[in-house]
Amino acid sequence: MSTPPTHRAAPPRRLPAGAAALAGVLLLIPCVALALVPTYSRETPRLWGWPFFYWYQVMWVLLTPLLTYTAYRVIRRARGDR
Amino acid sequence: MIAAAGDGVNGVELGVVLFFFIVVTAGGFLAARWRRAESMHSLEEWGLGGRGFGTVVTWFLLGGDLYTAYTFVAVPAAMFATGAVAGFFAVPYTIVAYPIVFVFLPRLWSVAQARGYVTPADFVRGRYGSRALATAVAITGILATMPYIALQLVGIQAVLDTMGLAGSSNWFLKDLPLIIAFAVLAAYTYASGLRAPALIAFVKDTLIYVVIVAAIVYVGVKIGFGDMFDAAKTKMTTPNPKTGQPAGTFLTGDATYWAYGTLAFGSALALFMYPHSMTAVLASRRRSVIRRNTAILPAYSLMLALLALLGFAAIYEVGQKKMTVFGHDGVANAQLAVPHFFQAAFPSWFAGVAFAAIAIGALVPAAIMSIAAANLFTRNIYREFFHRHATPKQEAQVSKIVSLLVKFGALLFVLGLDKQNALNMQLLGGVWILQTIVAIVAGLYTRWFHRWALLTGWAAAMVYGTVTAYRQTVPNTVTKLVGGQPVVQTHGLRHFGSSLADFPFTSTKTYIAISALVINLLLAVVLTVVLRALHVRDGVDETAPEDFYADVPAEEVVLEATREVAGAEQRVSDARRS
């Protein structure tokens, strides 16, 4: 195998269980919310003319990055990076 | 009377598109000098851009790569034709994809970085010590990517038809613009490798954002969201007088919950199994670049959601008799919904910007896909079976040539065969590529699965998925303008009519890829237990536990190391390993 210059100085660092669980929950929230299709497959309440089905899913487009980014920060902190 | 698309070429639109085409062509060739490496003669440099892309470049590259021109044309087209289940599932799909890949992609990046893997099949080869399994993953990747490249051409064709360039009856003149565009693309991809699409993606994504914002303002101000959704609801829920069936789905119903959910999650799981996504991920500089990108890539999903609604906006505009979806051949084609919407709603110069966005949006993923397919061929077929001791330079040379052949093949596919073939193949591609997930993602965490169990599960799922997709027949219906009136003609049945089928032993419509994955996983688990009990020999794992956490300590250090002491570093790391 042609190998690029690698830096494998860092030993495997397991995440503390608490941080891993917190990050996992944060990541799971949008997946569960969107998997429950019957909970949002309705037309009302409408928002600015948008049926619920449509604006609810677009709302998750905006919420999910916040959760993902928080999970990223949780992991960074637990590993002691910055 | 309904008129087909106007005759003659729109000069303003064509001028704007040509301008942007020339800009990206110049960019594509100049990209070879960007972050210039000592030598472009290796897959590390040509095929992965030197693994040097930071958060911002990776964001543009992945955005340009995953949200393709075909997506921009096909998702609104599906919304226009059959509504939410066929089209809007793309929104939950491109949301849940990121929390999912947040978990495992960094591990894949690390092991690829530590071991010099260029393709997902390289990882499978190293982890399971199985040539057969690696070849299966490589061939699945190539098969799934080829029709995807072909479909990018379909996106360009929709734009060319709208601009009036497809009107010529001479087949050569008619297809000439497409041939030229692809030849130029092939030339700069050959010269600059992954750097070319990375640079062009900046132009593409900027144009797309501008265009979407303008379109949504237009919908909000000129149409009104309420009226737009009402028009769509009327179309989707009104029963067809002939069949008594509604035209499509405005909201998902009892019968379509599982369809919607499995389409979203199945596609989300498959997204980063595609070789072109993997290529863009492996090109990033640090492990953290990937996780940061999972938080910022949904910006494109927002855009995709708004774009999907343009399919509904097109329904409204058709109702107002402002546009049609009839092409120059007089045949109704939902893929023309978005291009025709822009032509009807905006002045020519801005429609030109929108068309340039779609056309360039086709070039970026086509370039990355052809690089990814070429890398798979070079590393996992050429090197594995024909030339075991290929030098990095030979590998790069083979990849460059294969990337040309791949694009040429896609061109022939689209020009020579019915477009429907490309669509069928792409549907199958999604089903197929998901079947590599067991070997790849499980392999990132455990070596419990036996290589032969994984291979059998993959093979069974491939056969099941292909046969099931083939058996989904729908009436082959064409709506044609005859004497100014739309006439619906039906010519028997066609296969590959849907990506949904009854889940085995039930009557619940489910995404075929998910049913196949269940079969795949069951077989892999059961056979692993059996093979382990029988003590069948398993392959050698060349990876070490710490490989899955490997990272680059500081960016500056690495850039220096890569550029100045690459040779020395190589010897050191080789020595360390042996």
Image (spheres, coloured by chain):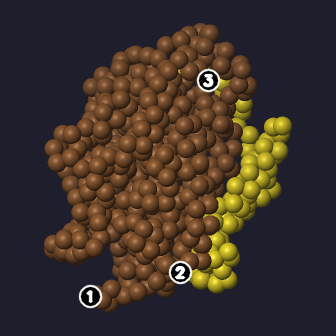
Chain colours: A yellow, B brown
Asked whether residue B25 is in view, the answer is: yes
Disc 2 and disc 1 in contact, CB within 8 angstroms: no
Quadrant where the image shows the C terminus of chain B: top right
Residue designated by label 2: B230
Query: Image quadrant of residue B469?
Result: bottom left
Residue designated by label 1: B242
Sequence-wise, the earlier of marks 2 and 1 is 2
Q: What residue is drawn where x is 61% and y is 23%?
A: A6
Kindly identify which chain the residue marked by label 3 belongs to.
Answer: A
Q: What residue is drawn where x is 67% and y is 21%?
A: B558
What amino acid is labelled 1 in the image? Answer: Lys
The reply to whether label 1 and label 3 mark residues of one chain is no
Residue designated by label 3: A6
Q: Is mark 3 on a helix, strand or loop?
A: loop
What amino acid is labelled 2 in the image? Answer: Asp
Distance (Cα) linking label 2 and label 3: 58 Å
- Residue B93: x and y in percent read 54, 61
User: In front here: B339 or A6?
Assistant: B339
Crowding at dot 3, Cα within 10 Å, few <14 / some 14-19 / many 20+, comes out as: many
| Residue B477 relative to residue B287: left or right | left
The reply to whether label 2 and label 3 mark residues of one chain is no
Q: Given this view, does label 2 or label 3 mark the residue nearer the observer?
A: 2
Rendered view: A52 above or below B313: below
Q: What residue is drawn where x is 49% and y is 13%?
A: B39
- Residue B314: x and y in percent read 45, 67
What amino acid is labelled 3 in the image? Answer: Thr
Disc 1 and disc 3 in contact, CB within 8 angstroms: no
Residue A14's disc number: none
Across the whole image, how many numbered discs are drawn on residues?
Answer: 3
Q: What residue is drawn where x is 50% and y is 26%?
A: B27
